[in-house]
Image (cartoon, helix red, strand yellow):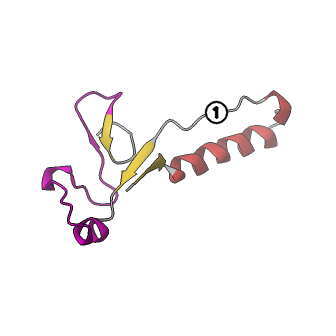
Amino acid sequence: MAYGPNYADGWRRAAKYVHKILNGAKPSELTVEQPTKFELVVNLKTAKALGRSVERRALIWPGERRSTGCDRSPALGSGAPA
């Protein structure tokens, strides 16, 4: 199981920084941003080998997004509202 930042979103944010710099912004004046989108990843094969089960309703396929109903509290996926 792993929980961490959404890397695709990080690359998009990095591209925005590059765009700002190429348009004349001074790198020293740009703010440092923290990740805002996170992912929870569960390896089902490993979970099964350890005798653990994951509820079917908690599973999503790559590219899908799911939230708990509150846009600020994502359950799984990229952290963006569904």
Identify the image quadrant of residue 49.
bottom left
Q: Is residue 50 visible?
A: yes
Question: Image height check: is 27 above or below 7?
Answer: above
Q: Main secondary structure of the magenta part?
A: loop
Query: What's drawn in magenta, residue-wise?
Result: 44-73
Question: Image height check: is 71 above or below 19?
Answer: above
* Residue at the image point whose x is 64% and y is 33% from the top: 33
Query: Of all residues shown, which one is farthest toward the left?
Result: 56
Q: Is residue 49 on the magenta stretch?
A: yes
Identify the image quadrant of residue 62.
bottom left
Front residue of 42/77: it is 42
Residue highlighted by disc 1? 33
* Residue at the image point whose x is 33% and y is 64% from the top: 43
**Which quadrant is home to the N terminus?**
bottom left
* Residue at the image point whose x is 80% and y is 43% from the top: 22
Q: Is residue 45 on the magenta stretch?
A: yes
Residue 19 is situated, as x and y percent measured from the top left of the image, at 72, 43
Front residue of 42/5: it is 42
Residue 77 is situated, as x and y percent measured from the top left of the image, at 34, 48
Position of 38 compared to 55: left or right? Answer: right
